[in-house]
Amino acid sequence: MPEGTAVVVRTSGSSGRPKAVALSADALRASAEATAERFGGHGQWLVALPTQLISGLQMLVRSELAGTQPVFFDGRFDAAAFLDRAEELDAERRFVSLVPVQFARLVDLAERDRAAADALRRFDAVLVGGQTLSVSLRSRAHELGVALKRSYGMTETAGGCVYDGVEIGDTRVRIRGGEVQLAGASLALGYVGDPELTDRVFITETGRDGAPVRWYRTGDSGELLGGMLTVTGRLDRVIVSGGVNVSLDEVERVVREQPGWASAVALGAPHHEWGERVSLVVDLDRGDAGERLAFDRVREVLRASLGPAAVPEWVTEMDEVPRLAGGKPDHAAIGAWMARLRSSFDEARRAGAASGMGDARSRREKGES
């Protein structure tokens, strides 16, 4: 256990490998104070995320520093019930932190229900992180007058450290080799029981003033434009299809902008000719499924936006896309499900082929053509 550890938080493990992150009290406090500074002061939080994850834990830390009592929303997320719970907030300033799937359901309800829209607008800040928010969802929230704040950060940074593309507190951002790297007081101490990984992703370099600077290598790809950070995806979420690199996160970004495809997840699938091709999984448990743009049209949009290598060959519908506790799609579980599905198809094809050969042999023995 690294010296100075106050709490150990396990990452959500969206790639199938959760890690135990050691955080100090100073890092947690630095993150919470930076959020309060950006929001113009402390307030009361409605907690609708698991408190064993950094996103939920930080709401408790912010509440403690603010001297306010958080209100908890437990159980399966329901937009109407959530907004009813929000009525129990009694502080002048009120905040909430959500993941995109929760926020999308709130926006869906607010567009149909004026009272729900009024309740959502009463939040001084609706912090949304964990995944990239689609431009269309951001536009819909803006039309409703919701005080949306997009958050970028992770357990290793004690929560969100970049809001709406701009660093908070003393956070520093740089891009090296296409990778987003972060520095600042909110960085974790390292990983429990994995010094090799700690040394690989937490690196110390000498700054221009001669002082050592500790950087966290996020594994995310991104760019800085006009001083604002844009995260474009995961460096490890890239497949090679016919010799062309294809970012699965970029595919998801484009697909999720299309009507009825907001829940889409892009995966790589083996292909006999191209090595790998993109495949899509989409959630049936969505109110907009009946308005879904045809798959052929989605393919055309992807071809025009990202090129032919990014065009998916298959789309598979699930009753509900499996998600981790923090709301991110569980890529490992989805990938395993897809592998089982492909295996069952292969077995069915082999059985059909064997049956066809048996029928042909029987016909030959009977003198049939």
Image (tube, rainbow, N blue to C red):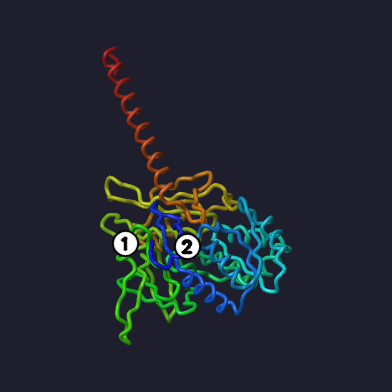
Q: Quadrant of residue 172?
A: bottom left
Q: Is residue 101 left or right of residue 221?
A: right
Q: Relative to 248, does residue 202 appear above or below in the rendering?
A: below
Amino acid, disc 1: Pro
- Secondary structure type for disc 2: strand
Which quadrant: the N terminus? bottom left
Q: Name the residue carrying label 1.
A: 195
- Secondary structure type for disc 1: helix
Q: Name the residue carrying label 2.
A: 7
Residue 352 or residue 113, whichever sits in front: 113
In the image as oriented, which residue stretches furthest toward the bottom?
209
Amino acid, disc 2: Val
Q: Are marks 2 and 1 in contact (CB under 8 Å)?
A: no
Percent coordinates x, y for residue 26 in the rendering = 47, 73
- The residues tagged by marks 2 and 1 sit, at their Cα atoms, a distance apart of 17 Å
- Badge 2 crowding class, 10 Å Cα cut-off, few under 14, some 14 to 19, many 20 or more, is few
Which quadrant: the C terminus? top left
